[in-house]
Image (cartoon, grey):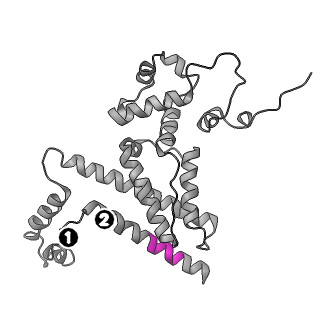
């Protein structure tokens, strides 16, 4: 009597198999009415409309017309559901056509930032470890392709990825917190920073604050005409990081 060869799903944990959509059983008969994709799609729709707090296994089940227990065959826990949702929301990475590595990283950062804007709840998903999903790995691969000709070793490239992706995530989170902080005031970030600089200019005297005072005196906190301060700050911070990467590249290729 013949034996079936083990599937790839037999070699990986069940949650990872579901994340990569590997078959975990040889199901026969009628197709299942519910599957991982339907569960994750409903959960992402809920998060897009109600935020991450609006996503519970009970609400997802009700949306799909099933019981909560029916979901456990396809999603092992709320934590697993969040990981599935995040990988689904990231989607495949875009093509990054750049001749210079810095331009490639800028394109990558802008693309992942845009994805966070499409799904604002993404930044709230707890990070329990390195990315594991196929779409997350696709974004990793796209970033590493930008660094392909830099001469950096794999471990250093991984470190650069951690720093840049962490910077993007933190910038998104900070921007959201600032927006929430001025909610109801009717003020934009430009207004808040301008008023802040002008109000403190009368209080921050050079005798007491010799280094800080000149910033207020020259209006360093006011944006140029037509400039989006959030975009400006994002690019400025990213370039500071990449300046450091450039030094590391020069040191490796010297």
Mark whose residue sits in front, 2 or 1? 1
The tag on residue 158 is none
Question: To which quarter of the image does residue 57 belong?
Answer: top left
Q: Position of residue 173 (x, y in %)?
A: 34, 51
Give me the residue at 54% from left, 17% from top: 70
Residue, disc 1: 224
Residue, disc 2: 233
Give me the residue at 52% from left, 52% from top: 93
Which SS type dominates the magenta stretch? helix
Out of 138 and 179, give the one closest to the viewer.
138
Q: Position of residue 137 (x, y in %)?
A: 58, 50
Out of 44 and 169, give the one closest to the viewer.
44
Q: Which residues are magenta?
A: 242-248
The quadrant of the rendering that contains the C terminus is bottom right
Picture layout, residue 167 above or below residue 135:
below
Q: Position of residue 112 (x, y in %)?
A: 44, 54
Picture layout, residue 242 above or below residue 169:
below
- 15 displayed left or right of 111: right
Asked which secondary structure carries label 2, the reply is helix
- 201 displayed left or right of 236: left
Q: Residues within 10 Å of mark 2 (few under 14, many from 20)?
A: few
Give the CA distance from mark 2 to mark 1.
Answer: 12 Å
Question: To which quarter of the image does residue 3 belong?
Answer: top right
Q: Position of residue 147 (x, y in %)?
A: 56, 67
Confirm whether residue 132 shows in the render: no
Out of 105 and 238, give the one closest to the viewer.
105
Confirm whether residue 150 shows in the render: yes
Asked which secondary structure carries label 1, the reply is loop
């Amino acid at each position: 009597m013949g034996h079936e060869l083990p599937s790839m799903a037999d070699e990986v944990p069940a949650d990872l198999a579901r994340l990569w959509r590997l078959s975990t059983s040889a199901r026969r008969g009628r197709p299942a009415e519910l599957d991982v994709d339907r569960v994750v799609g409903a959960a992402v729709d809920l998060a897009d409309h109600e935020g991450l707090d609006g996503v519970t296994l009970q609400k997802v089940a009700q949306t799909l017309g099933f019981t909560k227990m029916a979901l456990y065959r396809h999603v092992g826990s709320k934590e697993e559901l969040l990981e599935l949702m995040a990988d689904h929301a990231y989607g495949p990475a875009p093509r990054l056509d750049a001749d210079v590595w810095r331009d490639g990283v800028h394109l990558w950062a802008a693309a992942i930032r845009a994805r966070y804007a499409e799904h604002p709840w993404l930044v709230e998903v707890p990070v329990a470890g390195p990315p594991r999903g196929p779409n997350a790995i696709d974004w990793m691969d796209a970033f590493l392709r930008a660094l392909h000709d830099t001469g950096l070793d794999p471990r250093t490239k991984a470190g650069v990825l951690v720093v840049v992706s962490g910077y993007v995530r933190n910038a998104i989170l900070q921007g959201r917190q600032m927006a929430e902080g001025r909610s109801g005031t009717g003020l934009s970030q430009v207004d808040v920073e301008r008023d802040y600089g002008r109000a403190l200019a009368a209080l921050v005297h050079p005798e007491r604050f010799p280094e800080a005072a000149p910033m207020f005196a020259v209006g360093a906190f006011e944006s140029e005409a037509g400039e989006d301060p959030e975009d400006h700050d994002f690019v400025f911070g990213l370039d500071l990081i990449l300046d450091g990467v450039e030094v590391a590249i020069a040191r490796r290729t010297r």
